[in-house]
Amino acid sequence: MDVRYALEPDLGAEEFLDVLARSTLAERRPVSEPETIRCMLRNADVIVAARGDGLLVGVSRAITDFSYCTYLSDLAVDVAFQRRGIGWELIRRTHEAAGTGTTLVLLAAPLARSYYLRIGMAPHDSCWVIPRIPQAGPSP
């Protein structure tokens, strides 16, 4: 199957949720909060889609200032399409779209840590988070 990549700033929530479920990333995303999912997509700066025969098989979603920092908040590849270089290509194209002069940062899922090392990303030992408090909708 030929995989095609493209910026898709208007990616729909239904397709996004579907690929999250097929990638296992749904376990760590607010899939039961449709308005949050829509806001995640609407407010992203860069969304890159990977499609095989029209089917969304991978997606990356990033927030960036296009000059210094890019946070790659979601990287999802359908498990049936993993180990084909799709994740790496989504990362590369996301960084390219945001500007390779930015530092690309992501938080790895526990089972994905070895993947990021394998593709040449450098680990960082000081990340600090304040967990989200689920809401009915976006903050004002």
Image (cartoon, grey):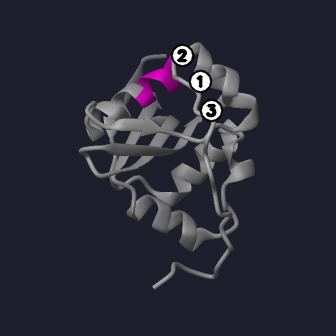
- Residue ID for mark 2: 119
Secondary structure beneath disc 3?
loop
**Percent position of residue 105, x then y:** 48, 39
- Residue 93, by quadrant, is top left
Amino acid type, residue under disc 1 in the picture:
Tyr
- Residue 6, by quadrant, is top left
- Residue ID for mark 3: 78
**Percent position of residue 22, x then y:** 67, 39
Q: Is residue 102 above or below residue 73?
A: above
Label 2 to label 1: alpha-carbon separation = 5 Å
Residue name at image x 41 percent, y 36 percent: 104
Amino acid type, residue under disc 2 in the picture:
Ile
Q: Is residue 94 above or below residue 135?
A: above
- Residue ID for mark 1: 116
**Percent position of residue 19, x then y:** 59, 43
Amino acid type, residue under disc 3 in the picture:
Asp
